[in-house]
Amino acid sequence: MIGTVNRVLLGLAGLVLLVVGGAVLVTGLGLSLPSWWPWDGTDDVLLSRSDRTRWRDEGWWWPTVIAVLAVLVVLALWWFLAQLRRRRLAEVLVDSGDGEGAMLRGRALESVLGVEAARLDGVADAKAALTGRRTAPRARVRMLMEPHASPGLALRGLSEGALTHARTSAGLDELPAEVRLKAVKHHVERVT
């Protein structure tokens, strides 16, 4: 989701900058402008003195400005903190039976999941990532499928094999997984 928000914010900022910059450029070059154009000459300014001071004496102006700025600060802070949030799980808590538990590195479990998934018939390559909380991890597995592969068999093999092994070895009650399948690009075989 944060990637989508980043793209939308970047697109909106770029669009605003493009429109404002284009308007200033067209006006500054002194090109012939339509009658509805807000600026009409090379000596014109974007905001005149009267435009900049029009609302200062109104009672609603300053509370509105402060509220809008506060909302922008809160949104910017939320966006900044969302950038710092870790998307991958660093460690998984394994119940060791002594009441304290042990920590399993998330990268190690991801590596084992990926290697075991890549060994399945019809799978060219596989990558795994863990997300969620360390007591309730979730797996995201991407598998690159060969042309002759059966997706149903590959999913069953992943579910009954790699995911089951990871869940039991980490002592987890469940390990929900999101699996994405993608086909290997290949050339068409010629039949003679």
Image: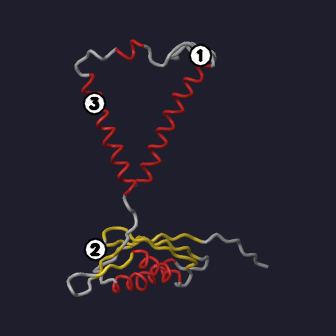
CA gap between label 2 and label 3 equals 42 Å
Looking at this view, is 27 or 96 the one in front?
96
Checking the image for residue 135, the label placed there is 2
Checking the image for residue 66, the label placed there is 3
Viewed as shown, does residue 98 lie left or right of 179? left
* Structure colour scheme: secondary structure
In the picture of the structure, the residue carrying the numbered disc 1 is 33
| Percent of width and height locating residue 182 | 54, 69
Cβ–Cβ under 8 Å for marks 2 and 3: no
Q: Is residue 177 above or below residue 66?
A: below
Count residues near mark 1 (Cα–Cα under 10 Å), then give few for <14, some for 14-19, many for 20+.
few
Amino acid, disc 1? Leu
**Quick one: SS at disc 2?**
loop
CA gap between label 2 and label 1 equals 64 Å
Which residue is found at the position 75% from the left and 75% from the top? 190
- Between discs 1 and 3, the one toward the N terminus: 1
Looking at this view, is 134 or 38 the one in front?
134
Looking at this view, is 55 or 179 the one in front?
55
| Percent of width and height locating residue 17 | 51, 33
| Percent of width and height locating residue 174 | 30, 78
Viewed as shown, does residue 35 lie left or right of 128? right
Q: Is residue 156 above or below residue 91?
A: below
| Percent of width and height locating residue 20 | 51, 28
Count residues near mark 2 (Cα–Cα under 10 Å), then give few for <14, some for 14-19, many for 20+.
few
Which residue is found at the position 63% from the left and 19% from the top? 29
